[in-house]
Image (cartoon, rainbow, N blue to C red):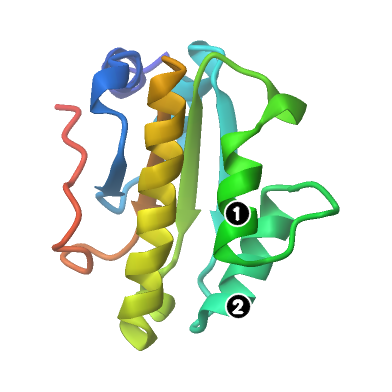
Amino acid sequence: MSTMSQRLQQLLAQSEFAGVYHLPHIDCKPLKQATLALGYGWLQADCSKQGEITPALEKLGKDLRLPDWYGANYDALSDCLSDLSWNAAPGYVLLISGADKLHGKDEAAFNTLNEVFADVIGNWKEEKVPFWVFYDMRPNSLASLPTLAAG
C-alpha cells in the first residue's frame, strides 16, 4: 500500500471528519485502496455527462446499483443511502466523478444534492458509521466544499 493510501486510511478511520469533500483531481486509486483496506463499502458514480439533476439521479442509481425501488429523486436517494443493508460495511466512501456539468448548469440542484448527502452522513454518524462523499472535479470548481488534505 502506498504512503498516500496509508494517510488516506488514517483519515477515513476518523469518522468524526466524515462529510462532503472536494477531492483534488488526482489518481483515485489510493482512495479506493484505503477504503477497501478499512473494509468500507466503495461506491462510485460518473456523472460527467449529466447537466441536469434528473439524469444525474438516474445515473447515481445505476452506477451505485441501488435497489429496484429507487425512484431517482432526492428522497429515494436519501432512503437508499441511509439503508445500505444490501452492502453492509463498517463505513462507506462514495466517489462522484465529473459533476462539473451539473454544478455549472444547475447549482441549486447540486446544492440540494449535497444537502441530501449531508443528511445521509448525519444519519450514519448517529449509528457511529462513517460515510464519506468525495467529488473528483476540476480544481477550484467547488470552492463551497472543503478540500481533502491527506498530506
**Residue at the (38%, 24%) spot, across then down:** 125
In the rendered image, residue 41, in percent from the top left (x then y), is placed at: 59, 26
As drawn, 68 above or below 141: above
Q: Say what amino acid the circle numbered 2 marks.
A: Thr
As drawn, 107 above or below 73: below
Q: Secondary structure at mark 1?
A: helix
Q: Which mark is residue 25?
A: none
Q: Secondary structure at mark 2?
A: helix
Q: Going by the picture, which residue comes out furthest to the bottom?
A: 105
- Using the image as rendered, state which of residue 149 and residue 56 is in the foreground: 56
Location of mark 1 (residue): 77
**Residue at the (67%, 48%) spot, across then down:** 64
In the rendered image, residue 87, in percent from the top left (x then y), is placed at: 71, 27
Q: Quadrant of residue 126?
A: top left
How far apart marks 1 and 2 lie (CA) works out to 12 Å
In the rendered image, residue 45, in percent from the top left (x then y), is placed at: 58, 54
Which quarter of the image is occupied by the C terminus?
top left
Q: Say what amino acid the circle numbered 1 marks.
A: Leu
Q: Which mark is residue 54?
A: 2
Q: Earlier in the sequence, mark 1 or mark 2?
A: 2
Q: Quadrant of residue 131?
A: top left
In this image, 130 relative to 14: left or right? right
